[in-house]
Image (cartoon, coloured by chain):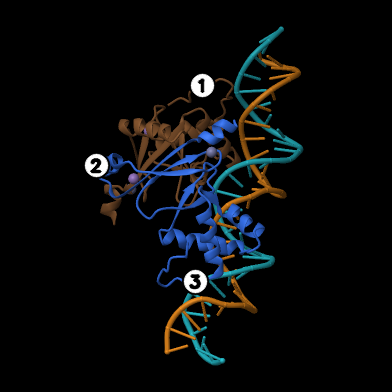
Chain colours: A brown, B blue, C orange, D cyan
Amino acid sequence: MTAPEVPGRRQTRQRSAVLALLDELDGFRTAQDLHALLRERGDAVGLATVYRALQALVDDGLVDVLRGSDGEAAYRRCSPVHHHHLVCRSCGRTVEVADPPVERWATRVAAEHGFADVQHQLEVFGTCSSCTAAG
Amino acid sequence: MTAPEVPGRRQTRQRSAVLALLDELDGFRTAQDLHALLRERGDAVGLATVYRALQALVDDGLVDVLRGSDGEAAYRRCSPVHHHHLVCRSCGRTVEVADPPVERWATRVAAEHGFADVQHQLEVFGTCSSCTAAG
DNA sequence: CGTGTTCATGAGAATCATTCTCGCATAAGC
DNA sequence: GCTTATGCGAGAATGATTCTCATGAACACG
Ligand SMILES: [Mn+2]
Ligand SMILES: [Mn+2]
Ligand SMILES: [Zn+2]
Ligand SMILES: [Zn+2]
């Protein structure tokens, strides 16, 4: 769980703290959440720094970002390979999933309509078993 | 192009104007954009009212909303049946597309992980032929 | 190790989309 | 027309995110 060395990226206590926290959590969390958690836990980090650290992690492909229905960004430590998410609306618990067919479909349907430089995003939302049990 | 009657929804000049404008446009537009367009065109509507009208249209299933990478909401008059979007990143031009297999896949993968009350969102982004030509 | 350069940090201000407030207008129903 | 619940609009409030800029600390180099 040591922070990966990324060229041109300076290693600081704050960035390590943000990444370490994300490593412990298994769901998507907002920057505000992460900032509050870090503050509670004692090793505090400025809010602006949390945002900057998260942006850097996203740029480096170590963290995925998802926009909630209210538009607030949520972040999660993710595997570096392409995948999609099955997310619990209630607690944020997330499972990485893959769907090879949709990859080909997206490319094909885009080509059929003359679209180039294609990307896609596919997310599945639901209520996880714990949250269903908790009512 | 007459505004559909929705029970319990009062018909006003402002709501008609918002829906009429959306009917002329074929891409996703932000509330701010739509407000500016209405103002230019003369039949102005208050900004708060644009937001309220759009929210009502979304609730009534007449309009789809999409969150851009910056988190800003964009709205589009869409068909009422379930579909996904192929969106031009540059000009916003949008094509409605369907992918029946992914519907089943989403339900199945969610069930396998014990998730209930499942929804999914799938969007494809690219550069349309016009925008590619315009370079 | 020092030391200097360069990049990072943090407190607060600024930005900006969206929502709220509340006094006034008006669509709908009779 | 008259009543009344709803909708409207201007401006204030909210809240996430970004910016500013003075200070702090990695890191490359000697
Ligand atoms: Mn994919
Ligand atoms: Mn679907
Ligand atoms: Zn859950
Ligand atoms: Zn285009």
Residue beneath disc 1: A5
Q: Which quadrant: the N terminus of chain A? A: top left
- For the residues beneath circles 1 and 2, the answer to whether they share a chain is no
Dot label at residue B11: 3
Residue D12 x/y as whole percent: 67, 65
Mark 1 residue type: Glu
Image depth: mark 1 or mark 2 in front:
2
Q: Residue at x 41, y 68 (%)?
A: B6
Quarter of the rendered image showing ligand 1: top left
Q: Position of residue A47 (x, y in %)?
A: 58, 42
Labels 3 and 1 share a subunit: no
Q: CA distance from mark 3 to mark 1?
A: 60 Å
| Closer to us: D20 or B60 | B60
Q: Does A40 sit above or below residue A61? A: below
User: Residue shown at 29%/43% (left/top)?
Assistant: B103
Residue in front for this viewpoint, C17 or D30: C17
Up-down: is A28 above or below B74?
above
Between the C-alphas of marks 3 and 2, the distance is 42 Å
Q: Could you tell me the amino acid type at mark 3? A: Gln
* Local SS, label 1: loop
**Any part of residue A62 in sight:** yes
The extreme front residue here reads B1
